[in-house]
Amino acid sequence: MPYHRADTSAQADKLSGIVEESDLYEGFAPHVETSEIKTLDFYNLPKQTGKEPALRSFTEIQQLLQQSKKRDVKNILRENSWPINSPIRSQLWPALCAQHLTKQNILDGFYWEMVHQVFGTTELSEKPIMLPAFVDATHCLPYHLTSTGRAVADRIVNVLGYDCPDITYSPVLYPIAALLLHFMSEEEAYVCLAGLVGSKEKTFINQTKLQNEVTWKTVMQIAKKHTKSAIAYFQRICPGQKLERVFMDWCWWILAGLPFQHLVRIMDCYFHEGIKVLYRVALVILNLFHKECQSNNEWSPDNIKNDIGNALIKFCKKIPVSPAKLLHAAFSIRGLSTQYISRIFIKTEMLLKSRSVLNSGSKQLIKSRSSDNLPTSQSQVNIQMMSHTLTIRELFTLWSWLPVRITMYQPVLLYTTEEHGCSLTTFYVRVEQHEPTLLMIKTCNNEVFGAYCSSRWFERNVKDDKGQRQAYFGTGETFLFSLYPERAKYPWVGIEGDRGLGHSSELFMAADSKMITIGGGEGQAIWMDENIRFGKTDGCKTFNNPPLCPSGDFEIRVLEVYGFVGI
């Protein structure tokens, strides 16, 4: 029997409190084995007095989503502990995931057309389906799906792999698909997964081995700062074990370890906020486990020292706090902003990529420098036809400094003062949605310098969790360069390793209606006025650069900004 979200809409909107035991399984889809789902009895929750605030309805949340009040939605999701069987999720989860869709308005029937294209029929096969190579067979967690539900999950993951060939390694994708299927139809679950996989603004699901490795190493770095006592304890009782082996399985503490009730409440927030929710929960798990190790003989050093990773998953299965307390602790961690996590992630990714290049052998490195990392003949022609600043020799130099993945794309001139005039407003209109961009300045004294800008200039308008515009944005891939009279590249200082760098070393890009700035901290590496006529350059802490032209102040003859086609 088909399962339709509309069937539970009235129930979802009227929900205002804990449902009666007789209605225990009303919120689940037909392909769920509800008899396996049990409520836990150790939370010591106070009895309902009738004075508790009513839980928020889907209609209220939907209105906030339509008004783009994402912060209000975030607070509601964090604070409202809807019961495990609440019918609200049949509407809430699809609406949250729909925010992240890049292919807006996926046509009705698209999924079933894809199913027919992949399998030759829309009938569900009784035979097992071979799963895509990116799935980890040891972590195909079905939770409480029936055998039919598992076959549906298999089919969704196969279709998604067919539609998204860039996914090469994504072990968490199957468990997320299975969780979605507990509260919605097959087609809705596919659309939700497509939104999470294709999201550009936030990360939800890693899709390559590199992303997976960068993620667990990011969690490890964050844990070393925010759970110092726990990390020190583990290192003390297991001096022979490397922390890396523990953190490689960090996501399975949550997805494979926590009780279903906890997991569903975490997903309420995850589908809106992204993977940072899982980061926070992982930190709380570490702290709780460390606390239990001090007082519970079950987790004594002798019992866990040989395999902390497995002990953590076992601990999660018996976690001694309710879902509400777990989330409250997770969201009470201070100093764990999206910007901070992003900086750690980018830095880790860049270090891994640089090691990969160095380990690939000298022959391959030489080949890369002499051929693979040079501009194609078409790129050379494009820039020579467009540019008023670059010679072929300068082009080759600049191209060798770009991230290797960017050199695969064709450059396109987005903005030039020669053609589009000298206006910061026009600059934003033509440039702000492109990422990355290459900004090139030629002064009236014929100096040539500029910057590779890793983030969109539109981010000058992005607000933080408090509703305030962030002064600086960008990532550690941003770098400065000088081409004439000196030739030099000035990368982010943090690329060489963490040396106790402060906030002033992470001031990559800033902009408003009056100016744009690149680099900060005791000076601005590049500053230009709103008329794109005058500018100045100083040394700065972010890039540890000298002034990019001898006089410091300069008059702009030409400004050119390039994007890259196909990114």
Image: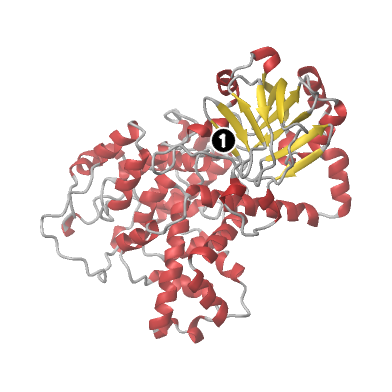
Q: Is residue 151 above or below residue 292?
A: above
Is 188 on the left or on the right of 444, as rendered? Answer: left
Q: Quadrant of residue 387?
A: top right
Camera-side residue: 427 or 5? 427
Which residue, given by chain and number where applicable, does mark 1 sit on? 510
Is 276 on the left or on the right of 456, as rendered? Answer: left
Q: Position of residue 218 (x, y in %)?
A: 57, 57
Is 170 on the left or on the right of 156, as rendered? Answer: right
Q: Is residue 133 at least partly visible in the picture?
A: no
Tell me which residue sits at (63%, 16%) in the image: 422
Q: Is residue 261 above or below residue 13?
A: below
Tell me which residue sits at (68%, 13%) in the image: 419
Helix, strand or loop at label 1? It is: strand
Camera-side residue: 56 or 93? 56
**Within-10-Å neighbours for mark 1: few <14, some 14–19, many 20+:** many
Tell me which residue sits at (48%, 47%) in the image: 125
Is 356 on the left or on the right of 253, as rendered? Answer: right
Q: Position of residue 167 (x, y in %)?
A: 60, 45
| The N terminus sits in image quarter | top left
Q: Position of residue 322 (x, y in %)?
A: 30, 65
Q: Position of residue 325 (x, y in %)?
A: 31, 63
